[in-house]
Image (cartoon, coloured by chain):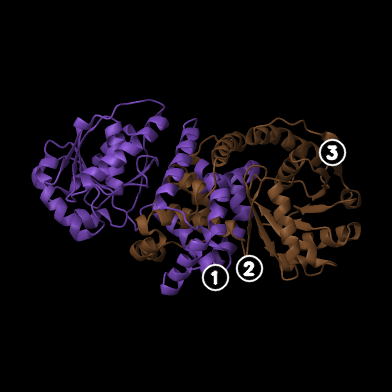
Chain colours: A brown, B purple
């Protein structure tokens, strides 16, 4: 398929690697003078990871990946659009009003937006029914999840097309039944992070210990199964019903004691200061490589079966 | 070391397997007539997992694992006590007042309690300074995390001994700086679960999709690194400070929209009903085996390096 990728930051470049790996022709629009080199670097370094994940080798067909500083040429013959521009409504409105001039009226336009709602993005479009959110988690070429969110004007059939498209890329697709801030995954992440901040700001635990509580504790379980299934297993032979009856009250007690911090200057300073104590001299690039190595191992293990 | 395990439910039996694997002599107290058989089954099935995790084979020395229905014989010559009785304060008080009669005055007593606070448990003890919480995550023989929590009367030196003891078992030890409901890990789990319930009760997402949002999305990342380190990587070259400046406001927007459900009858019915749709015919025993297989693979991958 001919895919137009609009915006090649971290997310756009990672999408490019994934889609190229799965045989699509990719036209990348990004106005930055370094976008082509940066994106090529991302593709180059993502490729061996994708080969490991899929236990296969594939050459990179660079001739099928083109770079554009014009929206018009990037959208030429496009059959799919994945938009990854900065998360500001006026940017999205501006870009969409331009690209609709260069696209067939039923070409799907997916937005990778994290923070914006599809109804707000699509409201001035010529053909809003083709627009929806397809939100990946970072890094998109590795993390399986894609969340689909329809706006008020989205045609349900486009979501069906989208499910097929992303599943062909090897993704796990979930669908929000309502649009809400943070979609689904980042609401869960935000809930977790709020308490992760509170534990540090209240002096209950160090940053390092909060992180270990996840990575060496709850995290590996959550990489295997989600919280509803985990607590089903916590309920013995009667499962979830028994869990809710016997341990529901303990959950509610904890809920009542959870914190509600604000990221004011004092809290931010404390987080940054404690972070430097917890992780001295950790370069993001080295951490990222190690993380991706672990992710690859986890995801390969998960290929054995799904729940 | 001679360890007395007081209470052999799911947690106690899993501790027994782990401690026996690491060469300790285990005396298990449990009044239930099926405790001995049940515990032996847990040890038998945990053992090959422990062998895989440590890439070694070891015989089970059954003669070093004894079963008792008397607290006095279970505590004989004990050098360490791990208490895993039901999470009710009056049960703990009763058991502790009995076992202190049979123990040397400086023998550490660790409680696996999830829901109770160490200060409340230790307050009537003869030697409260030897008491602390050492809370594992289920299943304790696989999940590395152990959280230590001191009560108001705990001697800090006991926590140092405890760190050494659990690290010798291959555990990752974290220490709560204050005692609070849920310690550390289960506060984070509760925060996550609260939103996982809200998403379903508000009809934003199905149970299956909430679980996938974790297991196929945020979970694998959280199995690699905790939230503070994850967002450090979300901040580009300036790291966490940049994340907090640029994406802190988006987090706060999400926090403001998170739900605060109650587990009333209606919500519980909805969860149970939707659970059966999401996971028809999934037997806890089969799920548990699959989960443990995945956990083993994840933990073996994580042995390569720690952050």
Whether discs 1 and 2 lie on one chain: the answer is no
How far is mark 1 from mark 2, CA to CA?
A: 9 Å
**Residue identifier under label 2:** A178
Whether discs 3 and 1 lie on one chain: the answer is no
Q: Quadrant of residue B80?
A: top left
Q: x%, y% of residue B4?
A: 19, 40
Within 10 Å of the Cα at label 2, are there few (<14), some (14-19), or many (20+) other Cα atoms?
some
Q: Is residue B134 left or right of residue A22?
A: left
Give the camera-side residue of B2 and A195.
B2
Q: x%, y% of residue B264?
A: 41, 73
**Residue identifier under label 3:** A64
Q: Which mark is residue B202?
A: 1
How far is mark 3 from mark 2, CA to CA?
A: 37 Å
Q: Quadrant of residue A185?
A: bottom right
Question: Could you say whether the residue bearing mark 3 is in a helix, strand or loop?
Answer: helix
Is residue B155 visible in the rendered image? The answer is: no
Chain to which mark 2 belongs: A
Q: x%, y% of residue A294?
A: 55, 36
Q: Is residue A42 left or right of residue A172?
A: right
């Amino acid at each position: 398929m001919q895919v137009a990728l609009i915006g090649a930051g971290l997310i756009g470049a990672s999408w490019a690697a994934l889609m190229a790996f799965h045989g699509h022709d990719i036209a990348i629009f990004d106005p930055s003078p370094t976008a082509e080199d940066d994106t090529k670097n991302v593709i180059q370094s993502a490729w061996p990871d994708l080969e490991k994940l899929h236990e296969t080798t594939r050459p990179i067909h660079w001739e099928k990946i083109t770079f554009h500083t014009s929206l018009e040429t990037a959208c030429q013959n496009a059959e799919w659009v994945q938009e990854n521009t900065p998360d500001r409504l006026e940017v999205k409105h501006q870009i969409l009003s331009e690209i609709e001039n260069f696209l067939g009226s039923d070409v799907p336009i997916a937005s990778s937006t994290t923070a914006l709602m599809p109804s707000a993005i699509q409201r001035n479009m010529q053909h809003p029914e083709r627009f929806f959110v397809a939100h990946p988690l970072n890094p998109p070429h590795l993390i399986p999840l894609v969340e689909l969110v329809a706006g008020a004007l989205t045609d349900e059939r486009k979501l069906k097309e989208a499910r097929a498209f992303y599943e062909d890329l090897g993704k796990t697709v979930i669908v929000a039944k309502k649009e809400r801030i943070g979609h689904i995954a980042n609401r869960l992440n935000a809930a977790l992070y709020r308490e992760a901040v509170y534990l540090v700001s209240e002096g209950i635990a160090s940053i390092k210990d909060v992180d270990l509580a996840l990575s060496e504790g709850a995290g590996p379980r959550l990489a295997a199964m989600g919280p509803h299934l985990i607590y089903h297993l916590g309920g013995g032979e009667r499962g979830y019903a028994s869990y809710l009856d016997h341990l529901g009250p303990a959950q509610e007690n904890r809920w009542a004691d959870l914190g509600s911090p604000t990221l004011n200057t004092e809290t931010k300073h404390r987080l940054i200061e404690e972070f430097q104590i917890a992780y001295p001299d950790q370069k993001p690039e080295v951490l990222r490589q190690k993380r991706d190595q672990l992710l690859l191992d986890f995801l390969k293990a998960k290929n054995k079966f799904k729940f």
